[in-house]
Amino acid sequence: MQDIPSAPPGVPPQRRSAGMTLFVALIAFVIGAGLVAWLATRGYLPTLLQAANTSTLTATPAPGPRPAAAPPAAQMSQIATVEGRLAMIEDRMSRIDLQTSAAAGNAGRAEGLLIAFAARRMVDRGEPLGYLADQLRLRFMNAQPRAVQTLVDFAANPVTIDALSARLEALSPELTVSTANRSLWERTRQEITSLFVVRRDSAALANPTARIERARLMLTAKRIDSAIGEVERLPGAEAADNWIADARRYEAAQKALDLLETTAMLEPNRLQDSTGHSVDQPSPLAPTAPAEEPAPEASEGA
């Protein structure tokens, strides 16, 4: 048997292994430091550190806080809030609808009043109504058919205040003729008419020339009925039959216009708008009915 080589004399085995380990560790440290220095000089070190941090965060994500479930009371409160908002929206929409219908009704009344004003201007000028006749039929025929027909018929053969005054001036010689120049029937009619005179006018007022002048003034003031009365009391009133008929037609047209204007402002349910629909909106000018007072309560002892 060969002998196992023994350790050098004077050196303990444990101290030799510890020194070898320290030498290897020193060499590894030097090599690592050199590698780190080389990576730093090349610019690779920050990239490697960032990649290492990203991989670490991805591998171990931090647990986030879980959303806490809303308690049932909070959920009911939210539902009640949503229902309240919906109710408010519905109430607002209903009020908007009422305001829209009110505005449409007032606009229909205003348009009808403008149509009546325009028809009055045409009548005063003695011009045909044209398209206004259709508008009058559309808006007022359901409420005031006679007034509309009166205006349409008058526009077919119009007459003006100026024309009536000129014709009255032209008829003055015939209207002032004395009773002696008239027939028996005319004198008899004049006598019968005079029986109903309650108060006789003075001689100046009964003068035919003064009556014609007053009739002319009444025409200027559009007091047609008074002008007709003055002409009918003239001695030769029969010569003014056509004039009286035209004056009465003019008076009827003016009354029809007044009626249509009042209808546009106050008619509660038969007025129509431009589309032919009834204007249901009450007029702001209509008088409101007074509130009924509550009946007195019977006493307990009764």
Image: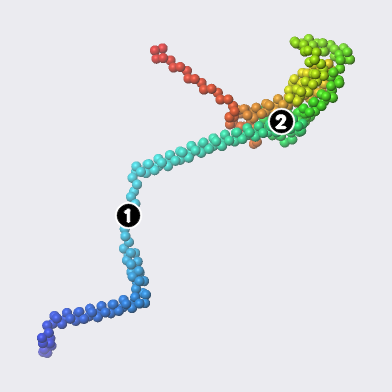
Between the residue at mark 2 and the residue at mark 1, the CA separation in whole angstroms equals 82 Å
Where is residue 12, by image quadrant?
bottom left
Q: Residue at x 84, y 19 (%)?
A: 175
Q: Position of residue 199 (x, y in %)?
A: 75, 11
Residue labelled with disc 1:
65
On residue 120, the disc is 2
Q: Residue at x 26, y 79 (%)?
A: 30
> In the picture provided, is 32 more to the left or to the right than 279?
left
Q: Position of residue 244 (x, y in %)?
A: 79, 22
Q: Nearer the viewer, residue 110 or 97?
A: 110
- Single out the residue that lies furthest toward the front: 204
Determine crowd level at label 1: few under 14, some 14-19, many 20+ residues with C-alpha closer than 10 A. few
> In the picture provided, is 169 more to the left or to the right than 85?
right
> In the picture provided, is 235 more to the left or to the right than 121?
right
Q: Residue at x 67, y 26 (%)?
A: 259
| Secondary-structure class at tag 1 | loop
> In the picture provided, is 235 more to the left or to the right than 65?
right
* The N terminus sits in image quarter: bottom left
| Secondary-structure class at tag 2 | helix
| N-term-proximal mark, 2 vs 1 | 1
